[in-house]
Image (cartoon, rainbow, N blue to C red):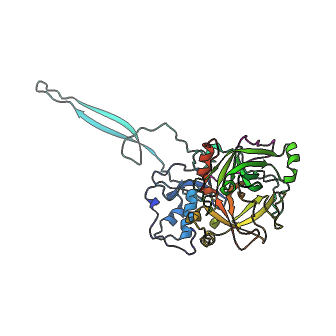
Amino acid sequence: MFLAHLELWPVALLLLGDIAAGQRRTNQVCILTNGKPGRCVPLNDCPEVAELAKGLVLYQNQLDRIEAVLRGCGSDLSSSDPIVCCASPRLPERKAVVPTTTTTTSTTTAATTTTSTTTTSTTTTTTTTTPATTSRPRTRSTTTTRRPTPSTTLATKPNRNILPERCGEEPPAFNVFFGVEDEANKHVWAVLLEIRKSNNSSTGRCVGTLIHESFVLTAAHCLHPRVEYIRMLFGVNRVSGFVECTIAGECQERLEADFIIHHNYNSHTSANDIALVRMREPVSTGADTGIIPACLPLDHVFDESLIDDPSVISLGWGETHEATTSDSKMLVLLNVMPQDECGNQLRNSNTFNRSMLYSVMCTRGLRKGQDVCQGDSGAPLLQLLEKRFYVVGVVSFGPKCGTSDVASVSLRVSEYTNWILTNMMHAPSGRVVFEN
């Protein structure tokens, strides 16, 4: 995917071989990479994708498109019954069944015995209703089959029901001004993490994202190694006003019960730099507190190559251009780099890990000096889609603050949704840290 040149694919996709059974999750609503609604259908029922996939030679950008529409409906290249997110699905043709009436006459002659001179013949007439499309007699069915009702939930993912129904809602009259603080505190899913590690007497900062009343999503390196405690502040805009905010009932504080670092996290290469923190007590969410979680991208994939405006929002209380930590929550608009450029930058790194090519995204500030910075680790990359904010990335590492010619690197959340859901459902008691 991260190739600097187009690479030829000499054979057609193997997934074309068996699509007859591909009826699961069909006719459900999905979200296309351009943000518009689509429909999950078998591959052959989506002409524009089927025609593309049948080519004997596929270029990398064509394969990327196929993978994106497969992921949109929970399929992948290994599926024997691929389902794709289609903009213009071909509806199956229905043949009209016209009943016709035919009369069949059969004649039966009774056997004649040697003691009788009389032969008796009987004639039986039967009437049968048959469809015009078949010669086999059938009885007309009185059972009505209803078309499946379209669902607003899409690809089936294990444990997805653990997530709240209300998430990432765009506030009324929402306007974003980047490079300034979130004065109206619209991004209520942002969490300030104050972390003390056992080898350091000082407290460091990271950012997390509330995705559930009991769980915060952040970066693994924030919790590695040997964390002594984690203090989480919710609903806060200005850190200096947290006490007053708490008294007013607008802010909340929680401590960690345990945390889960990805089992394949590598502290040297920053591969799989993702973690979950479970709170000792759930945070109060809803209209009374104004705090709600951000959404996870379960039903779509952020694909920068197929989006007209591949930009995301990030936020945090990290360092400013004056090299001091910010008292206020700041917003920044970031541009997601093309994947081939991102791959080239990663390859030039001394700690390059090939497994990261498909699991990260690279970003740059739209203006010089605007970027994620130290103290913003673990912060979300947020995509506004259909009036909801989705956390599509988690800030991992980057250059010196405000260095506009070098990109920052974030984890691509869509590659880790199953890991997130599984560990939320089966969160163990006690701290879990996977060290290298």
Furthest residue in direction left, as rendered: 114
Magenta region, mostly helix, strand or loop?
loop
Query: Which residue is pictured at 67% across the width and 57% down the height?
Result: 221
Residue 239 vs 252, above or below: the answer is below
Q: In the rendered view, does 261 fall on the left or right side of 370?
A: left
Residue 21, can we see it? yes
| Percent of width and height locating residue 198 | 71, 52
| Percent of width and height locating residue 32 | 63, 59
Is residue 289 located in the magenta-colored stretch of the structure?
yes
Residue 356 occupies which quadrant of the picture? bottom right
Residue 147 vs 79, above or below: the answer is above
Q: In the rendered view, does 214 fall on the left or right side of 66?
A: right
Q: In the rendered view, does 264 fall on the left or right side of 257?
A: left
Furthest residue in direction top, as rendered: 115
Is residue 194 located in the magenta-colored stretch of the structure?
no
Tell me the quadrant of the picture where the C terminus can be found: bottom right
Residue 401 occupies which quadrant of the picture? bottom right
Nearest the viewer among 36 and 340 is 340
Query: Which residue is pictured at 53% across the width and 66% down the height?
Result: 63
Residue 406 vs 232, above or below: the answer is below
Q: Which residues are magenta?
A: 279-298
